[in-house]
Image (cartoon, grey):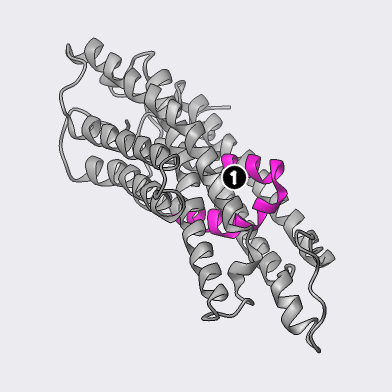
């Protein structure tokens, strides 16, 4: 196979991945629509008839068979989408004979792949978390479309400044950290929405029949956000350290407060604050979740604004 054929195949696989993820979003939404009714809802209205006795505390309300089938279809589509997504980067790398994250298009594509894979691993290990799939894959589809429309770059060789083995260390770690934080930030957003809804239901200000009632409990979502952040933080720490070492090798200094370096460090501080807040009385729950959301905002700002608007030593390729 020629390099041109592989490059075109990569582009077609990118489109295929978007289609598969879109179908997965539809299936996840259908699963929520036909999902289990909360225990509180059953207590109030039963199955559309008179009130019935609520299940015992801690009892698991079984899902309708149709919802389980839709959930399985959604997960299957997601996994096939991951396979084609991996193939996007593999064929791109083979076409240019290098690691396939040497520009903004490749970097962002890889970040999204890590985010989807992280969600899938969580959903397999804790099946209840499958129900956040629509809220994870929805932003993924939007991100993939924007990447294809605005960040696409024809396959080509690396610029001279990136021809270093540190590309495989620093940038790879940055991709992994960013992708994991992507999932963690979305989980914290869902936790904020679910916990606020639960508080309104408890106060009698909202109906317990909301779509949010079909998500995992607020505690489960918050736990997932925290665990992914704990996993991603040392990876991001290593990425920042590796970047400093590469900077010393390439530019003769470990740190120069370049915009990309500065915002990478700011992101590190925000996530360190989040992890600390989780252990601090008065900051657990919603306050710490807001810090995690801020961390995701900083990461996206670092990727987009710093690369497109500001100028610095990292401007040549749009990667970390």
**Above or below — where is 120 with respect to 98?**
below
Which span of residues is magenta-colored?
117-142
At x 47% / y 38%, what residue is drawn?
229
Residue at the limit of the structure toward the bottom, as seen here: 50
Residue 283 in the magenta stretch? The answer is no
Q: Is residue 10 visible?
A: no
Q: Name the residue carrying label 1.
A: 119
Return the residue nearer the eye: 45 or 115: 45
- Where residue 43 appears, as percent x and y from the top left, is 75, 78
Quarter of image, res 248: top left
- Where residue 82 appears, as percent x and y from the top left, is 61, 42
Return the residue nearer the eye: 89 or 37: 37
At x 33% / y 19%, what residue is drawn?
241
Return the residue nearer the eye: 17 or 234: 234
- Where residue 59 appears, as percent x and y from the top left, is 79, 60
At x 29% / y 24%, what residue is drawn?
159
Going by the image, does 61 lie left or right of 206? right
**Above or below — where is 169 with respect to 179?**
above
Dot 1, how many residues are within 10 Å of its Cα: few (below 14), some (14-19), or many (20+)? Answer: many
- Where residue 190 appears, as percent x and y from the top left, is 51, 58
Q: Main secondary structure of the magenta part?
A: helix
């Amino acid at each position: 196979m020629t390099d041109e054929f592989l490059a075109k195949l990569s582009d077609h696989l990118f489109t295929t991945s978007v289609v598969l993820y879109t179908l997965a979003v539809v299936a996840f939404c259908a699963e929520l629509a036909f999902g289990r009714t909360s225990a509180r809802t059953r207590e109030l209205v039963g199955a559309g008839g008179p009130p019935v006795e609520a299940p015992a505390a801690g009892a698991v309300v079984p899902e309708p068979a149709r919802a389980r089938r839709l959930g399985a279809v959604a997960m299957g589509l997601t996994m096939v989408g991951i396979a084609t997504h991996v193939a996007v980067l593999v064929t791109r790398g083979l076409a240019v004979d290098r690691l396939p994250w040497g520009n903004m298009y490749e970097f962002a594509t890889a970040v999204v792949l890590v985010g989807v894979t992280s969600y899938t691993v969580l959903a397999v290990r804790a099946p209840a978390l499958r129900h956040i799939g629509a809220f994870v894959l929805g932003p993924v589809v939007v991100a993939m479309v924007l990447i294809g429309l605005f960040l696409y770059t024809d396959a080509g060789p690396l610029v001279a400044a990136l021809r270093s083995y540190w590309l495989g260390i620093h940038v790879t770690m940055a991709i992994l950290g960013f992708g994991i934080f992507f999932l963690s930030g979305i989980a914290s957003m869902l936790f904020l929405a679910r916990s606020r809804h639960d508080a309104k239901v408890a106060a009698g200000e909202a109906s317990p029949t909301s779509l949010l009632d079909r998500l995992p409990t607020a505690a489960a979502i918050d736990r997932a956000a925290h665990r992914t952040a704990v996993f991603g933080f040392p990876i991001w720490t290593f990425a920042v350290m590796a970047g400093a070492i590469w900077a010393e090798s390439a530019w003769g200094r470990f740190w120069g407060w370049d915009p990309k370096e500065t915002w990478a460090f700011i992101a590190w501080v925000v996530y360190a604050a989040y992890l600390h807040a989780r252990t601090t009385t008065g900051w657990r729950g919603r306050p710490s979740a807001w810090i995690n959301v801020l961390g995701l905002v900083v990461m996206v700002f670092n990727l987009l604004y710093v690369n497109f608007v500001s100028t610095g030593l990292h401007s040549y390729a749009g990667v970390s």
